Image (cartoon, grey):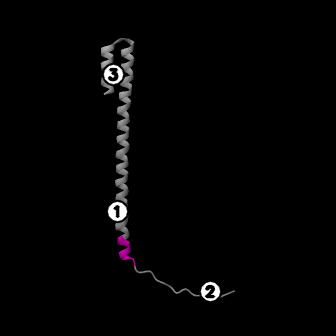
Amino acid sequence: MLAVAGVLCGILLGGRTGGALAFGLLLFGSLGVLFLIYIEVGRSEDRERAQDEQRRRELAGRQQDHVDSQRPPPVTRPRWKRRPN
């Protein structure tokens, strides 16, 4: 919207004032678009990172269940009392 307003100001006002307004509005409009693209890329990376973390947790849970089912029960050894010095 700011870029369109800048073009219209440049056409309708003319001269230095129109040129300055056109330049400023086009600049702010372009920066706004770049900012929105940057934010969207960051959000998509965050979503991808969260999905990867969830997959890792699910895979680790399945592997742990598999290991626990194959592991024999722990051997308990009697502890001998220590002799006093």
Looking at this view, name the residue that lies furthest to the right. Answer: 85
Residue type at tag 2: Arg
Residue 70 in the image, given as x and y percentages of width and height: 36, 76
Q: Nearer the viewer, mark 2 or mark 3?
A: 3
Q: Is residue 20 magenta?
A: no
Q: Which residue is mark 1?
A: 58
Q: Which residue is mark 3?
A: 6
What's the CA distance linking mark 1 and mark 3? 52 Å
Q: Nearer the viewer, residue 83 or 15?
A: 15
* Disc 3, SS: helix
> Which residue is painted at 32% across and 25% down in the image?
3
Q: Are marks 1 and 2 in contact (CB under 8 Å)?
A: no
> Which residue is painted at 30% across and 15% down in the image?
11
> Which residue is painted at 46% across and 83% down in the image?
75
Q: Quadrant of the C terminus?
A: bottom right
Q: Please give the range of residues in magenta.
A: 65-71
Q: Nearer the viewer, residue 12 or 77?
A: 12
Of the numbered discs 2 and 3, the one sitting upstream in the chain is 3
Residue 61 in the image, given as x and y percentages of width and height: 36, 66
Q: Are marks 2 and 3 in contact (CB under 8 Å)?
A: no
The answer to whether residue 57 is above or below residue 39 is below
In the drawing, what numbered circle is on residue 82?
2
Residue 40 in the image, given as x and y percentages of width and height: 34, 41
> Which residue is painted at 67% across and 87% down in the image?
84
Residue 83 occupies which quadrant of the picture?
bottom right
* Disc 1, SS: helix
Residue 74 in the image, given as x and y percentages of width and height: 44, 80
Residue type at tag 3: Gly
Residue 28 occupies which quadrant of the picture?
top left
